[in-house]
Amino acid sequence: MKSLFRNIVASLTIILCVAISSVRAELPPWTRFKLSNGLEVLVVENHLTPIVTIEIAVRNGSFTEPPDYNGLSHLYEHMFFTSNAKDTTTDAFLSRVDDLGIVFNGRTREELVYYYFTLPQQNLVEGMDFMSRAISSPLFKEDDLRKQREIVLGEFDRDEAQPLFKFNCKMDAALWGAWLSRKEPLGDRAIIRTATHEKMLAIKNKYYLPNNSLLIVSGDVDTRMIKELAPRCFQDWKAGPDPFKTTPPVRVPQLTRSSLVLDTLDIPQVVCNVKWHGPSIGLDDKSTYVADVFSYIVTQPDHEFSKCLRESGIAQEAGLGYYTQRYVGPITAQIVTSPDRLDSAMHLFWSQVAKFDDPNYFSDEEFETAKGAVRNYVLFESEKLSNFTHEIAFWWSTAGLDYYEHYLDDLSKITKADVAEYIHKYIQGKPYVLGLALSKSAAIVTEPSLAKYGNPNMPWR
Protein backbone atom coordinates (compact mmCIF):
# COMPACT_ATOMS: atom_id res chain seq x y z
CA MET A 1 0.00 0.00 0.00
CA LYS A 2 1.42 3.34 -1.06
CA SER A 3 1.10 5.54 2.00
CA LEU A 4 0.23 9.23 2.09
CA PHE A 5 3.47 9.76 3.98
CA ARG A 6 5.36 8.88 0.80
CA ASN A 7 3.23 11.41 -1.05
CA ILE A 8 4.12 13.99 1.58
CA VAL A 9 7.80 13.23 1.13
CA ALA A 10 7.35 13.59 -2.63
CA SER A 11 5.74 17.00 -2.10
CA LEU A 12 8.58 17.98 0.19
CA THR A 13 11.02 16.92 -2.52
CA ILE A 14 9.31 19.33 -4.88
CA ILE A 15 9.52 22.07 -2.28
CA LEU A 16 13.24 21.52 -1.86
CA CYS A 17 14.01 21.78 -5.59
CA VAL A 18 14.73 25.51 -5.58
CA ALA A 19 17.48 27.85 -6.73
CA ILE A 20 19.72 30.48 -5.17
CA SER A 21 21.22 33.51 -6.88
CA SER A 22 24.46 33.51 -4.92
CA VAL A 23 25.37 30.06 -6.27
CA ARG A 24 24.04 30.45 -9.81
CA ALA A 25 27.47 29.40 -11.14
CA GLU A 26 26.80 25.97 -9.63
CA LEU A 27 23.32 25.66 -11.10
CA PRO A 28 22.15 25.56 -14.70
CA PRO A 29 22.25 29.24 -15.71
CA TRP A 30 19.27 30.67 -17.53
CA THR A 31 18.34 33.70 -19.61
CA ARG A 32 14.95 35.39 -19.34
CA PHE A 33 13.23 37.76 -21.73
CA LYS A 34 9.68 38.73 -22.67
CA LEU A 35 7.94 39.03 -26.04
CA SER A 36 5.80 42.01 -26.92
CA ASN A 37 2.61 39.93 -26.43
CA GLY A 38 3.62 39.32 -22.79
CA LEU A 39 4.96 35.75 -23.16
CA GLU A 40 7.85 35.17 -20.77
CA VAL A 41 10.67 33.06 -22.22
CA LEU A 42 13.37 31.28 -20.24
CA VAL A 43 16.32 29.47 -21.84
CA VAL A 44 18.54 26.91 -20.11
CA GLU A 45 21.54 25.79 -22.16
CA ASN A 46 23.08 22.34 -21.66
CA HIS A 47 25.09 20.89 -24.54
CA LEU A 48 25.90 17.46 -23.12
CA THR A 49 23.42 15.67 -25.40
CA PRO A 50 21.65 16.79 -28.62
CA ILE A 51 18.24 16.85 -26.93
CA VAL A 52 15.88 19.80 -26.36
CA THR A 53 12.81 20.25 -24.17
CA ILE A 54 10.17 22.82 -25.10
CA GLU A 55 7.79 23.46 -22.21
CA ILE A 56 4.82 25.78 -21.83
CA ALA A 57 3.54 26.60 -18.33
CA VAL A 58 0.16 28.28 -17.81
CA ARG A 59 -1.24 29.81 -14.63
CA ASN A 60 -4.28 27.59 -14.59
CA GLY A 61 -5.30 24.54 -12.56
CA SER A 62 -7.84 23.76 -9.90
CA PHE A 63 -7.30 27.09 -8.10
CA THR A 64 -9.15 28.73 -11.00
CA GLU A 65 -12.09 26.31 -10.85
CA PRO A 66 -15.49 27.02 -9.30
CA PRO A 67 -17.49 23.83 -8.64
CA ASP A 68 -19.05 23.79 -12.13
CA TYR A 69 -15.58 23.72 -13.72
CA ASN A 70 -13.85 21.31 -11.31
CA GLY A 71 -11.59 18.99 -13.28
CA LEU A 72 -11.81 20.86 -16.57
CA SER A 73 -8.25 22.20 -16.37
CA HIS A 74 -7.19 18.56 -16.25
CA LEU A 75 -9.46 17.64 -19.15
CA TYR A 76 -8.07 20.61 -21.10
CA GLU A 77 -4.58 19.18 -20.57
CA HIS A 78 -5.70 15.99 -22.31
CA MET A 79 -7.35 17.91 -25.15
CA PHE A 80 -4.12 19.79 -25.78
CA PHE A 81 -2.62 16.67 -27.39
CA THR A 82 -5.45 16.04 -29.88
CA SER A 83 -5.86 18.58 -32.67
CA ASN A 84 -5.17 22.18 -33.65
CA ALA A 85 -5.63 24.55 -36.58
CA LYS A 86 -3.01 22.78 -38.73
CA ASP A 87 -2.95 19.27 -37.29
CA THR A 88 -6.71 18.92 -37.49
CA THR A 89 -7.09 15.37 -36.21
CA THR A 90 -5.59 13.39 -33.36
CA ASP A 91 -3.99 11.08 -35.92
CA ALA A 92 -2.38 14.06 -37.62
CA PHE A 93 -1.16 15.39 -34.27
CA LEU A 94 0.38 12.04 -33.30
CA SER A 95 1.86 11.60 -36.76
CA ARG A 96 3.63 14.93 -36.32
CA VAL A 97 4.84 13.76 -32.91
CA ASP A 98 6.35 10.68 -34.55
CA ASP A 99 7.90 12.65 -37.40
CA LEU A 100 9.72 14.94 -34.97
CA GLY A 101 10.75 12.20 -32.53
CA ILE A 102 8.85 13.86 -29.69
CA VAL A 103 8.30 12.50 -26.20
CA PHE A 104 5.43 14.52 -24.73
CA ASN A 105 3.37 14.89 -21.60
CA GLY A 106 1.60 17.40 -19.42
CA ARG A 107 0.54 17.83 -15.83
CA THR A 108 -2.25 19.64 -14.03
CA ARG A 109 -1.73 20.81 -10.46
CA GLU A 110 -3.52 23.18 -8.11
CA GLU A 111 -1.80 26.34 -9.38
CA LEU A 112 -0.22 25.24 -12.65
CA VAL A 113 -0.70 23.35 -15.91
CA TYR A 114 2.32 22.55 -18.06
CA TYR A 115 3.04 20.78 -21.35
CA TYR A 116 6.34 19.67 -22.80
CA PHE A 117 7.91 18.22 -25.94
CA THR A 118 11.33 16.58 -25.67
CA LEU A 119 12.90 15.99 -29.06
CA PRO A 120 16.20 15.80 -31.00
CA GLN A 121 17.98 19.13 -31.26
CA GLN A 122 17.85 18.99 -35.06
CA ASN A 123 14.04 19.28 -34.90
CA LEU A 124 13.98 22.30 -32.58
CA VAL A 125 12.61 24.79 -35.12
CA GLU A 126 9.77 22.52 -36.20
CA GLY A 127 9.10 21.58 -32.57
CA MET A 128 8.74 25.24 -31.57
CA ASP A 129 6.30 25.80 -34.41
CA PHE A 130 4.35 22.68 -33.43
CA MET A 131 4.14 23.81 -29.79
CA SER A 132 2.94 27.27 -30.80
CA ARG A 133 0.05 25.76 -32.80
CA ALA A 134 -0.89 23.36 -30.01
CA ILE A 135 -1.02 26.09 -27.37
CA SER A 136 -2.70 28.81 -29.44
CA SER A 137 -5.17 27.01 -31.72
CA PRO A 138 -6.71 23.87 -30.13
CA LEU A 139 -9.89 22.73 -31.84
CA PHE A 140 -11.72 20.88 -29.02
CA LYS A 141 -13.47 18.63 -31.51
CA GLU A 142 -16.49 16.78 -30.17
CA ASP A 143 -15.11 13.33 -31.02
CA ASP A 144 -11.86 14.14 -29.22
CA LEU A 145 -13.73 15.55 -26.26
CA ARG A 146 -15.82 12.41 -25.94
CA LYS A 147 -12.73 10.17 -26.03
CA GLN A 148 -10.70 12.27 -23.62
CA ARG A 149 -13.56 12.47 -21.13
CA GLU A 150 -13.49 8.68 -20.91
CA ILE A 151 -9.70 8.64 -20.52
CA VAL A 152 -9.86 11.13 -17.65
CA LEU A 153 -12.66 9.17 -16.02
CA GLY A 154 -10.43 6.12 -16.34
CA GLU A 155 -7.86 7.97 -14.26
CA PHE A 156 -10.58 8.40 -11.65
CA ASP A 157 -11.14 4.65 -11.70
CA ARG A 158 -7.44 3.98 -11.12
CA ASP A 159 -7.22 6.48 -8.27
CA GLU A 160 -10.39 5.20 -6.64
CA ALA A 161 -8.90 1.72 -6.61
CA GLN A 162 -6.25 2.96 -4.16
CA PRO A 163 -7.14 2.02 -0.56
CA LEU A 164 -6.83 5.54 0.85
CA PHE A 165 -8.42 7.46 -2.03
CA LYS A 166 -11.83 8.05 -0.43
CA PHE A 167 -10.25 8.73 2.94
CA ASN A 168 -8.02 11.39 1.42
CA CYS A 169 -11.02 12.89 -0.37
CA LYS A 170 -12.90 13.12 2.93
CA MET A 171 -9.87 14.77 4.53
CA ASP A 172 -9.66 17.34 1.74
CA ALA A 173 -13.38 18.05 1.96
CA ALA A 174 -13.04 18.75 5.68
CA LEU A 175 -9.90 20.83 5.21
CA TRP A 176 -11.18 23.03 2.37
CA GLY A 177 -14.96 22.93 2.80
CA ALA A 178 -16.92 24.83 0.16
CA TRP A 179 -13.64 25.68 -1.59
CA LEU A 180 -12.74 22.04 -2.32
CA SER A 181 -12.91 22.50 -6.11
CA ARG A 182 -10.03 25.00 -5.84
CA LYS A 183 -7.83 22.28 -4.32
CA GLU A 184 -8.72 19.16 -6.32
CA PRO A 185 -6.93 18.94 -9.72
CA LEU A 186 -8.44 15.54 -10.52
CA GLY A 187 -11.85 17.15 -10.44
CA ASP A 188 -15.45 16.01 -10.19
CA ARG A 189 -16.76 13.04 -12.18
CA ALA A 190 -20.10 14.61 -13.04
CA ILE A 191 -18.51 17.86 -14.25
CA ILE A 192 -16.00 16.02 -16.44
CA ARG A 193 -18.66 13.73 -17.87
CA THR A 194 -20.75 16.71 -19.01
CA ALA A 195 -17.86 18.93 -20.19
CA THR A 196 -18.57 20.84 -23.38
CA HIS A 197 -16.69 22.48 -26.23
CA GLU A 198 -17.92 25.83 -24.94
CA LYS A 199 -16.36 25.31 -21.50
CA MET A 200 -13.03 24.28 -23.05
CA LEU A 201 -13.11 27.42 -25.18
CA ALA A 202 -13.92 29.56 -22.15
CA ILE A 203 -10.82 28.24 -20.36
CA LYS A 204 -8.67 28.91 -23.43
CA ASN A 205 -9.92 32.45 -23.89
CA LYS A 206 -9.49 33.34 -20.23
CA TYR A 207 -6.27 31.60 -19.18
CA TYR A 208 -4.39 30.37 -22.25
CA LEU A 209 -2.87 33.72 -23.04
CA PRO A 210 0.78 34.57 -23.73
CA ASN A 211 0.69 37.12 -20.92
CA ASN A 212 -0.36 34.30 -18.53
CA SER A 213 2.25 31.77 -19.71
CA LEU A 214 5.94 30.88 -19.62
CA LEU A 215 7.90 29.25 -22.43
CA ILE A 216 10.95 27.26 -21.28
CA VAL A 217 13.47 25.95 -23.81
CA SER A 218 16.18 23.79 -22.28
CA GLY A 219 18.96 21.51 -23.45
CA ASP A 220 21.20 21.71 -26.51
CA VAL A 221 20.07 25.17 -27.57
CA ASP A 222 21.63 28.54 -28.32
CA THR A 223 20.08 31.46 -26.46
CA ARG A 224 20.66 33.86 -29.35
CA MET A 225 18.79 31.53 -31.68
CA ILE A 226 15.85 31.23 -29.26
CA LYS A 227 15.66 35.02 -29.02
CA GLU A 228 15.08 35.05 -32.78
CA LEU A 229 12.94 31.90 -32.97
CA ALA A 230 10.52 32.55 -30.09
CA PRO A 231 9.05 35.75 -31.59
CA ARG A 232 8.77 34.12 -34.99
CA CYS A 233 6.79 31.17 -33.60
CA PHE A 234 4.77 32.77 -30.77
CA GLN A 235 4.31 36.45 -31.59
CA ASP A 236 0.96 35.86 -33.34
CA TRP A 237 -0.48 34.35 -30.15
CA LYS A 238 -2.81 37.10 -29.02
CA ALA A 239 -2.64 38.59 -25.53
CA GLY A 240 -5.74 39.20 -23.45
CA PRO A 241 -6.89 40.73 -20.17
CA ASP A 242 -5.06 39.52 -17.07
CA PRO A 243 -7.42 36.76 -15.85
CA PHE A 244 -6.48 37.38 -12.23
CA LYS A 245 -7.46 41.02 -12.42
CA THR A 246 -10.80 40.33 -14.06
CA THR A 247 -11.47 37.41 -11.70
CA PRO A 248 -9.25 37.56 -8.59
CA PRO A 249 -8.32 34.09 -7.28
CA VAL A 250 -10.26 32.76 -4.31
CA ARG A 251 -8.23 32.34 -1.13
CA VAL A 252 -9.55 29.60 1.15
CA PRO A 253 -10.46 31.10 4.53
CA GLN A 254 -8.65 29.73 7.57
CA LEU A 255 -10.21 26.92 9.58
CA THR A 256 -12.27 28.10 12.53
CA ARG A 257 -12.69 24.78 14.34
CA SER A 258 -11.16 21.31 14.48
CA SER A 259 -12.98 18.31 13.06
CA LEU A 260 -12.74 14.51 12.86
CA VAL A 261 -12.83 12.43 9.68
CA LEU A 262 -13.40 8.71 10.10
CA ASP A 263 -13.17 6.08 7.38
CA THR A 264 -13.27 2.30 7.61
CA LEU A 265 -11.07 0.26 5.29
CA ASP A 266 -10.04 -3.33 4.89
CA ILE A 267 -6.54 -2.68 6.22
CA PRO A 268 -4.68 -4.06 9.24
CA GLN A 269 -3.09 -0.73 10.17
CA VAL A 270 -4.53 2.54 11.37
CA VAL A 271 -3.65 5.56 9.23
CA CYS A 272 -3.89 8.83 11.12
CA ASN A 273 -3.61 12.18 9.34
CA VAL A 274 -3.54 15.60 10.95
CA LYS A 275 -3.82 18.60 8.65
CA TRP A 276 -3.56 22.33 9.27
CA HIS A 277 -3.79 25.34 7.00
CA GLY A 278 -0.22 26.49 6.52
CA PRO A 279 1.45 29.62 5.14
CA SER A 280 0.74 31.16 1.75
CA ILE A 281 3.18 32.63 -0.74
CA GLY A 282 2.69 36.38 -0.96
CA LEU A 283 1.30 36.63 2.57
CA ASP A 284 3.99 34.96 4.66
CA ASP A 285 6.96 33.91 2.53
CA LYS A 286 9.32 33.52 5.47
CA SER A 287 7.15 30.88 7.09
CA THR A 288 7.28 28.81 3.90
CA TYR A 289 11.07 28.58 4.27
CA VAL A 290 10.73 27.75 7.96
CA ALA A 291 8.12 25.06 7.24
CA ASP A 292 10.46 23.32 4.83
CA VAL A 293 13.41 23.30 7.23
CA PHE A 294 11.36 22.24 10.25
CA SER A 295 9.71 19.41 8.31
CA TYR A 296 13.13 18.22 7.20
CA ILE A 297 14.49 18.23 10.75
CA VAL A 298 11.70 16.25 12.41
CA THR A 299 11.54 13.61 9.68
CA GLN A 300 15.21 12.67 10.12
CA PRO A 301 15.60 9.20 11.69
CA ASP A 302 17.77 10.45 14.56
CA HIS A 303 15.44 13.26 15.64
CA GLU A 304 13.26 12.86 18.73
CA PHE A 305 10.02 13.01 16.72
CA SER A 306 10.99 10.04 14.57
CA LYS A 307 12.72 8.12 17.33
CA CYS A 308 9.90 8.24 19.87
CA LEU A 309 7.30 7.19 17.29
CA ARG A 310 9.08 4.93 14.84
CA GLU A 311 12.19 3.65 16.56
CA SER A 312 10.11 2.80 19.63
CA GLY A 313 7.89 0.59 17.49
CA ILE A 314 4.77 2.55 18.39
CA ALA A 315 4.35 3.67 14.78
CA GLN A 316 5.40 2.09 11.51
CA GLU A 317 5.60 5.50 9.86
CA ALA A 318 5.57 9.06 11.17
CA GLY A 319 6.18 12.22 9.21
CA LEU A 320 5.46 15.90 8.76
CA GLY A 321 5.41 17.87 5.53
CA TYR A 322 4.41 21.20 4.04
CA TYR A 323 3.29 21.81 0.44
CA THR A 324 4.07 25.31 -0.83
CA GLN A 325 1.12 27.13 -2.38
CA ARG A 326 0.18 30.74 -2.98
CA TYR A 327 -3.41 30.14 -1.92
CA VAL A 328 -2.94 28.30 1.40
CA GLY A 329 -0.44 25.46 1.60
CA PRO A 330 -1.39 22.49 3.80
CA ILE A 331 0.74 21.14 6.64
CA THR A 332 0.27 17.38 6.98
CA ALA A 333 1.36 14.93 9.65
CA GLN A 334 0.82 11.22 9.27
CA ILE A 335 1.16 8.28 11.61
CA VAL A 336 0.70 4.66 10.60
CA THR A 337 0.30 2.30 13.53
CA SER A 338 -1.62 -0.77 14.71
CA PRO A 339 -5.06 -0.55 16.36
CA ASP A 340 -3.72 -1.69 19.74
CA ARG A 341 -1.09 1.08 19.71
CA LEU A 342 -3.27 3.92 18.45
CA ASP A 343 -3.83 5.43 21.90
CA SER A 344 -0.10 5.45 22.64
CA ALA A 345 0.80 6.76 19.20
CA MET A 346 -1.61 9.70 19.39
CA HIS A 347 -0.50 10.54 22.94
CA LEU A 348 3.12 10.59 21.81
CA PHE A 349 2.29 12.60 18.69
CA TRP A 350 0.51 15.39 20.55
CA SER A 351 3.20 15.44 23.23
CA GLN A 352 5.71 16.03 20.43
CA VAL A 353 3.57 18.80 18.94
CA ALA A 354 3.59 20.48 22.36
CA LYS A 355 7.40 20.52 22.19
CA PHE A 356 7.66 21.92 18.68
CA ASP A 357 8.33 25.48 19.91
CA ASP A 358 10.84 24.45 22.57
CA PRO A 359 14.22 26.03 21.70
CA ASN A 360 15.88 22.78 22.78
CA TYR A 361 13.69 20.57 20.60
CA PHE A 362 16.48 20.56 18.05
CA SER A 363 20.06 21.73 18.38
CA ASP A 364 21.77 24.59 16.58
CA GLU A 365 23.79 21.96 14.74
CA GLU A 366 20.65 20.14 13.58
CA PHE A 367 19.20 23.44 12.42
CA GLU A 368 22.24 24.43 10.37
CA THR A 369 22.68 20.89 9.09
CA ALA A 370 19.11 20.94 7.80
CA LYS A 371 19.68 24.15 5.87
CA GLY A 372 22.91 22.73 4.46
CA ALA A 373 21.22 19.49 3.46
CA VAL A 374 18.54 21.40 1.58
CA ARG A 375 21.21 23.35 -0.30
CA ASN A 376 23.11 20.18 -1.23
CA TYR A 377 19.94 18.47 -2.35
CA VAL A 378 19.07 21.43 -4.57
CA LEU A 379 22.46 21.39 -6.24
CA PHE A 380 22.26 17.65 -6.80
CA GLU A 381 18.75 17.73 -8.24
CA SER A 382 19.53 20.69 -10.52
CA GLU A 383 21.79 18.39 -12.54
CA LYS A 384 18.68 16.61 -13.88
CA LEU A 385 17.69 19.07 -16.59
CA SER A 386 14.25 17.59 -17.25
CA ASN A 387 13.32 17.87 -13.56
CA PHE A 388 14.84 21.33 -13.38
CA THR A 389 12.65 22.48 -16.28
CA HIS A 390 9.47 21.29 -14.54
CA GLU A 391 10.56 22.92 -11.28
CA ILE A 392 11.07 26.24 -13.02
CA ALA A 393 7.50 25.97 -14.32
CA PHE A 394 6.09 25.12 -10.90
CA TRP A 395 7.82 27.95 -9.05
CA TRP A 396 7.16 30.52 -11.77
CA SER A 397 3.42 29.87 -11.49
CA THR A 398 3.05 29.30 -7.75
CA ALA A 399 5.63 31.60 -6.20
CA GLY A 400 7.27 33.64 -8.95
CA LEU A 401 10.83 33.30 -10.18
CA ASP A 402 12.13 35.94 -7.77
CA TYR A 403 11.04 33.73 -4.86
CA TYR A 404 12.52 30.74 -6.65
CA GLU A 405 15.90 32.32 -7.31
CA HIS A 406 16.31 33.72 -3.80
CA TYR A 407 14.82 30.87 -1.83
CA LEU A 408 17.97 29.40 -0.33
CA ASP A 409 19.51 32.79 0.25
CA ASP A 410 16.45 33.80 2.26
CA LEU A 411 16.28 30.39 3.93
CA SER A 412 19.84 30.81 5.22
CA LYS A 413 18.70 33.87 7.20
CA ILE A 414 15.98 32.17 9.25
CA THR A 415 16.52 31.55 12.96
CA LYS A 416 15.24 29.17 15.60
CA ALA A 417 13.04 31.99 16.85
CA ASP A 418 11.41 32.03 13.41
CA VAL A 419 10.59 28.34 13.87
CA ALA A 420 8.78 29.05 17.14
CA GLU A 421 6.85 31.86 15.45
CA TYR A 422 5.83 29.50 12.63
CA ILE A 423 4.71 26.81 15.10
CA HIS A 424 2.62 29.29 17.09
CA LYS A 425 1.09 30.80 13.98
CA TYR A 426 0.09 27.61 12.17
CA ILE A 427 0.22 24.50 14.39
CA GLN A 428 0.05 24.76 18.18
CA GLY A 429 -3.43 25.70 19.33
CA LYS A 430 -4.69 26.05 15.76
CA PRO A 431 -7.74 24.28 14.29
CA TYR A 432 -6.96 21.11 12.39
CA VAL A 433 -8.57 18.16 10.68
CA LEU A 434 -7.89 14.80 12.32
CA GLY A 435 -8.48 11.77 10.11
CA LEU A 436 -8.48 8.11 11.10
CA ALA A 437 -8.69 5.26 8.59
CA LEU A 438 -9.02 1.87 10.23
CA SER A 439 -10.83 -1.44 9.99
CA LYS A 440 -14.47 -1.69 11.06
CA SER A 441 -13.61 -3.95 13.96
CA ALA A 442 -10.93 -1.54 15.19
CA ALA A 443 -13.36 1.37 14.91
CA ILE A 444 -15.82 -0.42 17.18
CA VAL A 445 -13.16 -1.21 19.77
CA THR A 446 -11.46 2.19 19.84
CA GLU A 447 -14.60 4.37 19.51
CA PRO A 448 -12.72 7.22 17.79
CA SER A 449 -13.58 10.77 18.73
CA LEU A 450 -11.92 14.16 18.58
CA ALA A 451 -12.01 14.34 22.36
CA LYS A 452 -10.15 11.03 22.61
CA TYR A 453 -7.53 11.45 19.89
CA GLY A 454 -7.36 15.17 19.26
CA ASN A 455 -4.98 17.74 20.69
CA PRO A 456 -5.39 17.62 24.49
CA ASN A 457 -3.90 21.10 24.79
CA MET A 458 -6.74 22.89 23.04
CA PRO A 459 -10.53 22.78 23.32
CA TRP A 460 -12.04 20.44 20.76
CA ARG A 461 -15.60 21.76 20.76
Image (cartoon, rainbow, N blue to C red):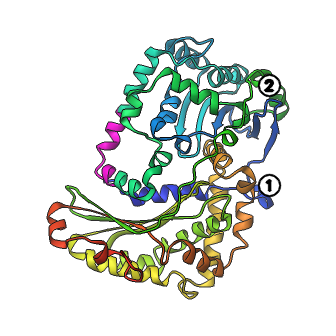
Q: Which quarter of the image is occupied by the C terminus?
A: bottom left
Which residue is located at x 42 percent, y 80 percent? 458
Q: Is residue 80 visible?
A: no
At 63% from the left and 11% from the top, the residue drawn is 86
Q: Is residue 289 above or below residue 96?
A: below
Question: Label 1: few (<14), some or many (≥20) within 10 Å?
Answer: few
Q: Which residue is mark 2?
A: 229
- Count the marks: how many? 2
Would you identify the image quadrant in which residue 348 lies?
bottom left
Q: Secondary structure at mark 1?
A: helix
Relative height, residue 116 to residue 274 (above, below): above
Residue 168 magenta: no
Residue appearing at x 36%, y 33% in the figure = 190
Give the percent coordinates (x, y) of residue 45: 76, 39
Circle 2 SS class: helix
Give whichever of 155, 277 is nearer the camera. Answer: 277
Q: Nearer the viewer, residue 340 or 248?
A: 248
Left or right, 124 with respect to 96, comes to right
Q: Tell me the residue that label 1 is attached to.
A: 25
Relative placement, left or right, of 227 versus 245 is right
Where in the figure is residue 212, as x and y percent of width and height?
A: 69, 37
The residues tagged by marks 2 and 1 sit, at their Cα atoms, a distance apart of 26 Å
Quarter of the rendering occupied by the N terminus: bottom left
Q: Does the segment drawn in magenta span residue 165?
A: yes
Q: What is the x, y in percent for residue 63?
A: 55, 45
- By secondary structure, the bulk of the magenta-drawn segment is best described as helix
Q: Residue at x 78, y 58 (%)?
A: 21
Pick the residue in front: 117 or 425.
Answer: 425
Q: Give, as a three-letter code, the residue at label 1.
A: Ala
Side of 413 where 88 appears, left or right: left
Q: Quadrant of residue 279?
A: bottom right
Q: Which residues are magenta?
A: 154-167
